[in-house]
Image (tube, rainbow, N blue to C red):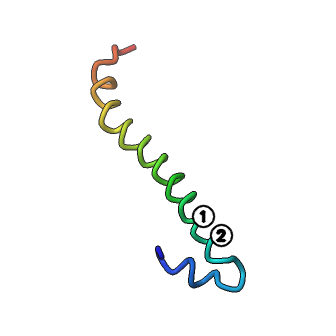
Amino acid sequence: MAGGVCEASLGVWSRGAATRYLVCWGIHAGAYLGVVVGVFLEGRPALRRAPGP
């Protein structure tokens, strides 16, 4: 699995728990990445149009 987390966690977590952790981590990281990309793509034009003080 990704980055050897499942193999590194053997004996501490079951393989299923390590897999669930990776899925949860992937969803979490993807959500942050989506926000960053969305702000970058959609926020730039709005910032350019913003009236000055």
Left or right: residue 42 compared with residue 30: left
Please name the amino acid that badge 2 sits on: Ala
Residue drawn where x is 28% and y is 19% of the image: 49
**Element under disc 2:** helix
In space, the residues marked 2 and 1 are separated at their CA atoms by: 5 Å
Q: Return the residue nearer the eye: 18 or 50.
A: 18
Q: How many marks?
A: 2
**How far from the left and from the top, in percent, is residue 23?**
53, 61
Crowdedness near tag 2: few (<14), some (14–19) or many (≥20) residues, C-alpha within 10 Å: few
**How far from the left and from the top, in percent, is residue 50?**
34, 18
Please name the amino acid that badge 1 sits on: Arg
**How far from the left and from the top, in percent, is residue 9?**
64, 81
Left or right: residue 7 compared with residue 14: left
Left or right: residue 19 compared with residue 49: right
**Element under disc 1:** helix
Location of residue 18 by image quarter: bottom right
* In this view, 12 is above or below 45: below
Q: Return the residue nearer the eye: 52 or 6.
A: 6
Residue drawn where x is 48% and y is 47% of the image: 32
Q: Return the residue nearer the eye: 42 or 26.
A: 26
Residue drawn where x is 35% and y is 15% of the image: 52
* In this view, 39 is above or below 49: below
Location of residue 36 by image quarter: top left
Location of residue 34 by image quarter: top left
Report the residue marked by disc 2: 17
Marks 2 and 1 close (CB-CB < 8 Å): yes
Crowdedness near tag 1: few (<14), some (14–19) or many (≥20) residues, C-alpha within 10 Å: few
Report the residue marked by disc 1: 20
